[in-house]
Image (cartoon, helix red, strand yellow):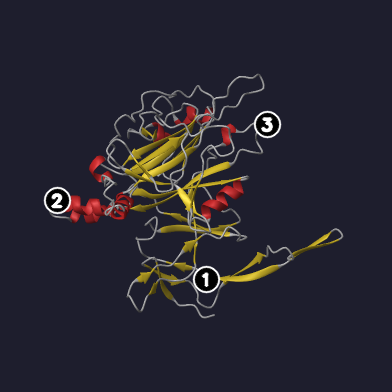
Amino acid sequence: KVVPEHIKIQDVDYYCASVSTPIRIQIQKTGKDDTKKYGDITFKSYREEKYFLYYTYSTGASPGQPITDVFVDGNIFTSGISTAICANSEDVVDSATGETKKAKLYGNSQLPCFIHAMYEKSKNRVFNKLYLGEGNTREEALAQLLEQECADFVEMDLNDKTKNNKNAKNVKYVYMGYRGYTIDTDAIKKARTEEAKKEERDSQFSDAIYDIVCTVDEEFHPEGIISEKNHLYYTPVCRENENGQSVAVDLNSGTRGAKIYMYYCTPWMTNKYNSKVADNIRKIRASSPQDVFSAPITRICFTDYDRVPYLQNATADSMTSASVDAEDNASEGSLSDLSLCEDKWEYVLYSNSDTPADLNDGAVIRDEKGYTVNNKVTMFVQRYDGSVKPSAEITGGYVSPKVESGEMWIVE
């Protein structure tokens, strides 16, 4: 098969590394007759698939930064490094209507190896998509993330502290993934008037995530939710199954805790919702998040126990001695950077509440002596301009290194 040297995928130009040199991969067949056993010997059937590597110079592709390193291994994801995904075709223009049908991106978790790319660091990156994956094993959860077009993930099983000897087989592994893009600050600066600067800034932030909330002890709302305060529209963190139905991940999946689902809002999703309900007189149009919040989210943090991301009482050495696993998923910063960080963090709250969300809410487990174990997992965010959502301010928590060891993961 002859492949083109240049294609468009979701309106971005890509170029083939070699049209004559495909990557040949042996994929194990999964049919019932594809694995046969003769005595102690098992025979497996394989098929060969050919993949061609494409790259782009465009800053419009996530995350919008130059690639600094590429490597291949058998891991679906590597912390702080993006995984390359596949496309089923290129963009196609309908000859009858003139409309462009964009290529479908997907992740093939059945591949025996994966290509990873490390990107140049940037402090102007914002998030535009969140994902959740669950599974009976870590690999199953990460495979589910990849199959949703996810390229980056947070190396923290959000259900890890809810497992014990009695329920370990039932509790699912749950991981969060994300996508982001880089703001072109030069284009904003070049605008001549303040009005033009605001227009350019709002345009670039149109896909950005402005807020994240969780519902607790409620059923999943595939159509999204509307907040009572400010009347904001939040889209669910979910995936589509084979029938096109929305399927969400319960953050307490497999535990005895309350059902917890995650939602987020962006200007683009708000406009889409408003267009959908425009003719329904019983539906009220949602407010734009750009009218409620001064800036989108640019960093996300998960912590164990009651720990908060303010580390003013700790140094790099004291954090290490306390066995705090502080990682920056974008490979940007260090332990000392985190301890000296003056930017304000805020809690991710429950929907229609001023209460910080506990991602293990109600998932009670006990130690060998029968005492309740502190398995709280809290989520924090930072905003592009350093502002804080009202009622989400951090007012307590551990800031001393003299506490039980745990994990803290920061994504930016």
Q: Is residue 4 above or below residue 354?
A: below
Q: Residues within 10 Å of mark 2 (few under 14, many from 20)?
A: few
Residue 166 — which label?
A: 3
Instruction: State the SS at label 1.
Output: loop
Q: Quadrant of the N terminus?
A: bottom right
Instruction: State the SS at label 3.
Output: loop
* Outermost residue, left side: 193
Q: Residues within 10 Å of mark 3 (few under 14, many from 20)?
A: few
Query: Taking 128 as reference, is 286 left or right?
Result: left
Question: Upstream in the sequence, badge 1 or badge 3?
Answer: 1
Measured in 3D between alpha carbons, the distance from the residue under mark 2 to the one under mark 3, in whole angstroms, is: 61 Å
Q: Quadrant of the C terminus?
A: top left
Measured in 3D between alpha carbons, the distance from the residue under mark 1 to the one under mark 2, in whole angstroms, is: 45 Å
Residue 265 — which label?
A: none
Query: Taking 249 as reference, is 225 left or right?
Result: left
Residue 52 — which label?
A: 1
Measured in 3D between alpha carbons, the distance from the residue under mark 1 to the one under mark 3, in whole angstroms, is: 47 Å
Disc 3 marks a residue whose amino acid type is Lys
Q: In the rendered image, which quarter is residue 196 located in?
A: bottom left
Q: Is residue 32 above or below residue 139?
A: below
- Label 1 or label 3, whichever lies nearer to me, is 3
Tell me if I can see residue 81 in this picture.
no
Tell me if I can see residue 176 in this picture.
yes
Disc 2 marks a residue whose amino acid type is Glu
Image coordinates of residue 166 in percent, x first then y, are 68, 31
Residue ID at (56%, 73%): 22
Asked if labels 3 and 1 touch by Cβ distance under 8 angstroms, the answer is: no
Image coordinates of residue 295 in percent, x first then y, are 27, 43
Per the image, the residue denoted by label 2 is 195
Q: Nearer the viewer, residue 14 or 207?
A: 207
Image coordinates of residue 82 in percent, x first then y, are 48, 54
